Image (cartoon, grey):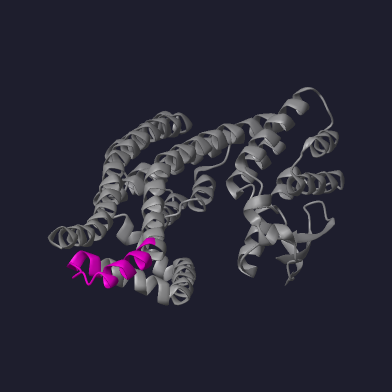
Amino acid sequence: MYQYKAYTLDRQIIEGTIDAATEDIAELRLHEAGYNHILTLKKTASPFSIEGVFPTLFSIKKTDIIDFFSQLATLMDARVPFVQALWILSEQTKRVAFKAVITKLGQQVAGGVPFSQALAQYPKLVSSQYCQVISVSEKSGDLPRGLRLVVSYLEKETGVSANIKKMLAYPVFLMALSIFVVLMVALMAVPALLKLFNSMNVALPLSTRILVGVADFLINYKFHLIAGVIVVVFSVLWLWKTPPVKRIVDQLLIKIPVFGSVIAMRNICRFCRTSSMLVEAGLTLPQSLNAVIGIIDNCVIKEALTDIRLDIIKGKPLSRQMANVKLFPRLLVDVISIGEKTGTMQSSFTTMADYYEKRLDKRMHKLMALIEPASILIVGLVISFIGISIIQPMYSIYQNLGQG
């Protein structure tokens, strides 16, 4: 969290706080918000709050933002004064965290701060590309259109993300179930059965000895195991955030035969849909690419778009530069080339966004068609191994009793 004091375009001094990981990022976001002359910028400790400890319980969801922008556009169309519309929506909002955000937005707008600049202080809620769309629509005098443009994009993005989560839910459930079964058997059933086998002097087969060894390890080293898992998880998360490691991982992920194509297509969908929205809002192609680069989550594609943007600033065509990068499909390059020649770039981006979103959905379904049977097979093998490991000694006991 950083506390700032800056000049606005109309020479007014504005004070506030902005959430950012580093001072450079905070300064960049303030410049994007229109605060070109920053007087002071210093780091401040974030106050303790229950929301900070349990963010998922109090977090503002994308659906909240969608409803907020939709309702705000509707109130503006009904000729309700803008600040009054913000107060109305603040009163109607049930989520406490979002109510505080809307109230602060209303206070800043009432003080003369443009709505897009006020929104830019919440990058986790409203990304920079949305703020740029709203800023352009503010300057053109048609803010409701900009809000609805952002809403349409958010709805499509939320729909794609929801489909991906829905398809991954079943395999994740099966894997969690298999882990739960192994833990319950290892911690509760195996110790009791082991006492029985020892009392009957039963020779344990290899599978049973492996199961007993796993159970002993889980029982004797459970706290070490938990600590180890926590250390590994936090280490992976920390390493993932470091640029060199993330770049290496992204390079490996995009080369995986099935998953790599899904990752690439997901980012291509974002590139096309966001570019369509920004070009329709009135931003230039370099400005649009600058915003698009910020939402691409793969370093390889991000670096390629960064180089392309520099070439476009020099006056080179977008399609020609994209053709030099193997990550971009030939069809996408050809359609953008036609859009450049006919002056219909926005339509080209929209068409390709719709096309690749449908292809991504089909590819995800095919991927899930492979993952679901594999998950069922793995769970079946685990349960079968446990069953065989328990039944074999029991069968030996039965044979001994029969002979006796």
Q: Please give the name of the residue rendered at 73% of the width and 26% of the height, measured from the top-left corner.
A: 74
Is residue 44 depicted above or below 276 in this figure?
A: below
Q: Please give the name of the residue rendered at 68% of the width and 52% of the height, measured from the top-left corner.
A: 122
Whether 199 is among the magenta residues is yes
Query: Could one spot residue 51 in this view of the protein?
Result: yes
Q: Please give the name of the residue rendered at 61% of the width and 34% of the height, measured from the top-left corner.
A: 151
* 47 left or right of 211 in image: right
Q: Which of 353 and 316 is in front in this view?
A: 353
Screen quadrant of the C terminus: bottom left
* 161 left or right of 373 in image: right
Q: In which quarter of the image is residue 85?
A: top right
Q: Please give the name of the residue rendered at 44% of the width and 68% of the height, measured from the top-left corner.
A: 236
On the image, the x and y values in percent for residue 187 come to: 41, 65
On the image, the x and y values in percent for residue 247 come to: 39, 64
Whether 64 is among the magenta residues is no
Q: Quadrant of residue 388?
A: bottom left
Q: Nearer the viewer, residue 130 or 158?
A: 158
Point out the stretch of residues depicted in magenta: 189-209
Query: Could one spot residue 304 in this view of the protein?
Result: no
* 73 left or right of 314 in image: right
On the image, the x and y values in percent for residue 354 come to: 42, 30
On the image, the x and y values in percent for residue 366 come to: 29, 37
Q: Nearer the viewer, residue 168 or 30?
A: 168
Is residue 217 depicted above or below 318 in this figure?
A: below
Q: Which of 370 and 343 is in front in this view?
A: 370
Q: In which quarter of the image is residue 21?
A: bottom right
Is residue 100 depicted above or below 144 in this figure?
A: below
Number of callouts: 0
Is residue 60 depicted above or below 306 in this figure?
A: above
